[in-house]
Image: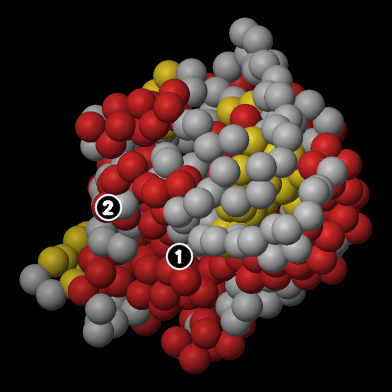
Amino acid sequence: MGSARNRAIDLPGLARRVKLWGSELGFQQVGITDTDLGVAEGRLASWLELGRHGAMDYMARHGTRRSRPAELVPGTQRVISARMDYWPAGAADPERLLGDGRIGYVSRYALGGDYHKLMRKRLRGLADRIADEAGPLGYRVFSDSAPVLEKALAEKAGLGWIGKHTNLLNRSAGSWFFLGEIYTDLPLPVDGSGGGHCGTCEACLQACPTGAIVAPYELDARLCISYLTIELRGSIPLALRPLIGNRIFGCDDCQLVCPWNRFARPSVEPRFVPRARVTDRQLVELFSWSEQEFNDRTAGSAIRRIGYACWLRNVAVALGNAPSSSAVLDALRGRRDHPSELVREHVAWALDQHLRAAPSGCGSEPLASGIRRKCSR
């Protein structure tokens, strides 16, 4: 990163205008911080040492570049952090969806279009406005797209505090928002960070279906349903499958119970409007999609990135937890010989769940090669 500025700049005035321009570009809040993340670096190191990142090897791969912005982008002096609300206006009540085991629950952030490109495009627009006034500007933009400690930076920039569930919280907006950053060599004045406001509340710890929030402010990703359904590419641990319920992409439980989300506002961004192709669909229907249908219906969505095999794996687990019906059993049997070993394994487990719960009957039902269980008529 490098730039040349040959004239004096009113940095405090520019910082105020940066926030105004951010609002005009669709961000709900913009803050500025320095690059000192020493405390967050220590917490990350401890988390990695405990192995709580699971199969997310990339969390350790970049070393201190994640916690030292100037190592990732040389010359960085400041980080401009921005948030954009995504709570989907008009979406069905999540509590109702979670209570209906026939429907696949998708995390609220993934109901609309993928946010990565949109956030980065808006951030580049903000950086261009800064350069128009300040002259040539050294910068890079990120939104969940590089080794960046986004929540720690946003907390330092005054956008909120990291709550007991480890998500960023804002007193006037809750936690339903995306984050993005501009790393820049422009020495803008920094904003102050505020204190936390979780108090004695532990609703998120109590609500987590798998106990992934192992203590206040401590998350074991290996137990987290978002990790299991999105980041994990292999077999979901047997003990955790029944706890996943009908969550097929991500989990929102810790946010749904958070009192601060009373203040969350619906997103005004058209691209975050829920897409009918993936919203509130029956599990049996979702499981019937061909790979081409999956690709077509998740195009432009964050869901696409898990791939077809993991999609079927997730839906198979949800079907194993669903109320038994001939439609559910037929759907599972139809995938019993799927080419993917990963899919076959989870289908066999799901069928076994239903057959174990069924009244004793006669005959036998082949679940997978070499496996047979008693079934009811």
First in sequence: mark 1 or mark 2? 2
Query: Which of label 1 and label 2 is nearer to you?
Result: 2
Inspect the image, locate mark 2, and give the three-letter code of the amino acid beneath it: Arg
In this rendering, position of residue 33 left or right of residue 238: right
- Residue 325 versus residue 247 in the image, above or below: below
Closer to the camera in the image, 265 or 331: 265
Closer to the camera in the image, 363 or 269: 269
Q: Which residue is mark 2?
A: 61
In this rendering, position of residue 76 left or right of residue 19: left
Neighbour tally class for label 1: few under 14, some 14-19, many 20 plus, Cα within 10 Å: many
In this rendering, position of residue 372 left or right of residue 101: left
- Is any part of residue 352 visible from this angle? no
Total tally of numbered discs in the picture: 2
Q: On the rendered image, what quadrant is the C terminus found in?
A: bottom left
Q: Look at the numbered disc 1 and give the secondary structure of its residue.
A: helix
Q: Which residue is mark 1?
A: 315
x 43%, y 27%: residue: 38
In this rendering, position of residue 51 left or right of residue 111: left
Q: Look at the numbered disc 2 and give the secondary structure of its residue.
A: helix
